[in-house]
Amino acid sequence: MKDPCDHYTFDLIGGVPKKPGRKPLGERAMTVAERKRRSRELRRNRLQELSVTVELSRDAQKSLDKMIEWWGVSKKEAINRALMIACQSQTGRTGSLFELELGMQLPAKAPRRKAPR
């Protein structure tokens, strides 16, 4: 019988020693290239979504809860929709919010002149 406090001696009755390290995600361990490809993809996905932490008033929290109930979506999706709707109502447009219209394009910068010596 094995002492319950002994974590170093191999259990001779039905025990199989565990492999060191993390368990592989699939059937086998990933190669270095597969790990790097996965890490780049995860980093790309994290950069596309920005995280914001805010404190809401009770009234705002109640409104958010109502939107979640009406739309049947997560908090994140409800906040995204509410912000898009608010921005569209302010700009009076239903198209893309962040593209500049032809009349609103920024003027091109004039080339800098060299200072006289």
Image (cartoon, rainbow, N blue to C red):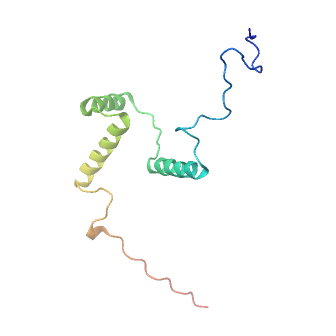
Residue 107 higher or lower than 93, as above or below: below
Residue 86, image x, y percentages: 28, 46
Query: Is 3 on the left or on the right of 35, as rendered?
Result: right
89 or 44: nearer the viewer? 44
Residue 28, image x, y percentages: 56, 40
> Which of the image's four quarters has the N terminus?
top right
Q: Looking at the image, which residue is at 50% across and 82% down?
A: 112
- Farthest residue, direction top: 1
For the image, the number of numbered tags is 0
> Which of the image's four quarters has the C terminus?
bottom right
The answer to which quarter of the image holds residue 61 is: top left
Query: Is 80 on the left or on the right of 14, as rendered?
Result: left
Q: Looking at the image, which residue is at 46% across and 47% down?
A: 50
Residue 24 higher or lower than 109, as above or below: above
Q: Looking at the image, which residue is at 32% across and 44% down?
A: 83
93 or 81: nearer the viewer? 81
Query: Is 92 on the left or on the right of 43, as rendered?
Result: left
22 or 73: nearer the viewer? 22
2 or 108: nearer the viewer? 2
Q: Looking at the image, which residue is at 65% across and 16% down?
A: 14
Residue 91, image x, y percentages: 26, 54
- Farthest residue, direction bottom: 117
